[in-house]
Image (spheres, grey):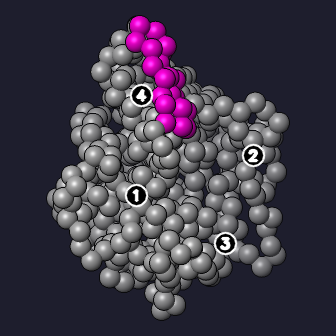
Amino acid sequence: MTNRSAAPSRRTFLKTAALATGAAALPSWAAPAHARRDTGLRIGVIGCGGRGTGAAANALEASPDARIVALGDVFPEHLSGCRSQLASLGDGFGGRGAVAEDACFLGFDAYRRVLAAGVDLVILATPPHFRPIHLAAAVDAGKHVFAEKPVAVDPAGVRAVIASGEAAKSKGLSIVAGTQRRHERSYTEAMQRVHDGAIGRVVAARCSWNQGGLWMHERAPEWTDMEWQLRNWLYFTWLSGDHIVEQHVHNLDVVNWALGAAPVRCGSLGGRQCRTSPAYGCVFDHFATEFEYPGGVLVSSQCRQIDGCSGRVDETIYGTDGVCTTSPGAARIEGKAPWLYEAAGPHNPYVQEHADLHAAIRLGTAVNGAAAVAASTLTAVMGRMSAYTGKAVTWEQASESALDLSPPAYEFGPLPVAEVAVPGRTPLL
């Protein structure tokens, strides 16, 4: 069993995250030309919804010798839809997405059967709550992992991921997370310049993911509580972590990357202004957080999912000698060392993250992004904890918290919806 109670120190987080960042940032286009080729990578997919199906297609595009050989999900239409889409990929994929019917597994234990189906590598793309469980099982089974972000929804899950990352190191296994900005050329080039001193000493930062609302499935009469929540996982904190964790983790990960640190403490505001119907579960629709990093560096963070409002998805790092601004596909530095990212040909970071993982597996040079993505996940979780409770939260409080959002059982049946958090009333655990 993975330890969900032993909290690593902040020093341990930063040390392991820094090492993981350096390894995971190695782009596969820089890999030696003599990289060993073998009979191909056999990939299993755990979580066959839209993101799992997309990630599987990205993995096939990343390597001409990769094959999808097993699928697992709790919903039969997810399995059949994913299987159909992968089988129908164009001629360039050579049938590498075709999965035999007897290698398609259904149920809460489907992940175990995928892991036992002769795979080398698994894609973990279920709702985030399940990530620590599936990651621990994959590492225990000796499999390399591509784990979608975030990797947990609570401090107990973060601790489990850190433990799995350490276990993977001891086995020489690679773990790459779906924080694709760390594999995107505009970001890797910008961060290299920031770390080389192009903007001087970093003194502040800001980041945002402000957008409109997302999908929601009206509840069908025959759905149990568990099925309804799984089908609308975005709106239940135990499944998604709320959108500050599920989505805004991308931006917070960039800030942690730029600063080479995790926050010391934070204070957060948030609420449920527009998505007030019970159909939207128990999550908030907006957050605003001030994070304090070592040295007194302050970071302003915003995320919102409300229709009709202005959108913004980017990060800005302020230094003594300049300012670096990043967003998907774009980056620039203004100041003493001005720079503008110019794309050098087609580049898809969603494919590149798989290419980097596959290259590491073939070269036998394990990469391990578990600590870095765990730190970014906990950064987002502590922001949510602060907003839900109305209390300032330190890194130590978050990392040592007893908060564990796991349900009493993984089965279709009754499952009460958590109360919507009320700042000032909801306790800090």
The magenta stretch is 323-343
Q: Which element is circle 2 on?
A: loop
Label 2: how many Cα within 10 Å (few below 14, some 14–19, many 20+): some
Name the amino acid, label 4: Ala
Question: CA gap, disc 2 to disc 4?
Answer: 30 Å
Label 4: how many Cα within 10 Å (few below 14, some 14–19, many 20+): many
1 or 3: tag closer to the N-terminus? 3
As displayed, is residue 397 above or below residue 296?
below
Could you tell me which residue is drawn at 79 percent across and 68 percent down?
219
x and y, in percent, of residue 44 in the image: 42, 74
Question: CA gap, disc 3 to disc 2?
Answer: 22 Å
Q: Are marks 3 and 2 in contact (CB under 8 Å)?
A: no
Name the amino acid, label 3: Glu
Question: CA gap, disc 4 to disc 1?
Answer: 21 Å
Name the amino acid, label 2: Gly
Query: Where is the N terminus found, in terms of image quarters?
Result: bottom left
Residue 141 falls left or right of residue 385: left
User: On the image, numbered disc 1 is attached to which residue?
Assistant: 354
Work out whether residue 152 can be spotted. no
Label 3: how many Cα within 10 Å (few below 14, some 14–19, many 20+): many
User: On the image, numbered disc 4 is attached to which residue?
Assistant: 190
